[in-house]
Amino acid sequence: MATGKKRGPKTDNPKPYKIGVKLDQEAKDILDAYCEQEAVSIMEATRRGIKRLKPDLK
C-alpha cells in the first residue's frame, strides 16, 4: 500500500523539524506544571517558550 501519500490531516503550519532535549528535574517539574495549568502538550509549551526568546534576538 505504498502510494506515496502522506498520512494525517493537512495543516497550514507544518512542523517538519524534530529536536531532542535533556532536562534536569527542576526544568521538567516547571514544564509539567505549566502543561497542566495551561492544558497544553509538552511540545506546545516548548514552542511557546521558544517564541518568548524572540524579543531577545539582536
Image: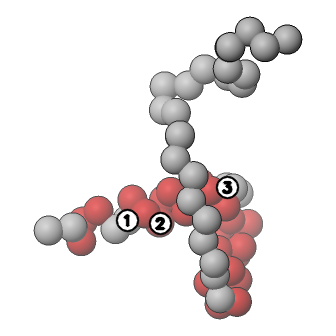
Q: Nearer the viewer, residue 11 or 4?
A: 4
Residue 46 location (% of width, % of height)? 55, 62
Q: Is residue 40 left or right of residue 53?
A: right
| Location of mark 1 (residue) | 52
Q: Image point 39% across, 59% down: which residue?
A: 51
Q: Quadrant of the C terminus?
A: bottom left
Q: Residues within 10 Å of mark 3 (few under 14, many from 20)?
A: few
SS class of the residue under badge 2? helix
| Location of mark 2 (residue) | 49
Q: Quadrant of the N terminus?
A: top right
Find residue 19 and report its image quarter: bottom right
Circle 2: residue type: Gly
Q: Are marks 2 and 3 in contact (CB under 8 Å)?
A: no
Q: Is residue 17 left or right of residue 8?
A: left
Residue 38 location (% of width, % of height)? 65, 61
Distance between mark 3 and mark 1 Cα atoms: 16 Å
| Location of mark 3 (residue) | 40
Circle 1: residue type: Arg
Q: Are marks 1 and 2 in contact (CB under 8 Å)?
A: yes
Residue 43 location (% of width, % of height)? 62, 56
SS class of the residue under badge 3? loop
The mark that comes first in sequence, 2 or 3, is 3
Q: Is residue 17 left or right of residue 22?
A: left
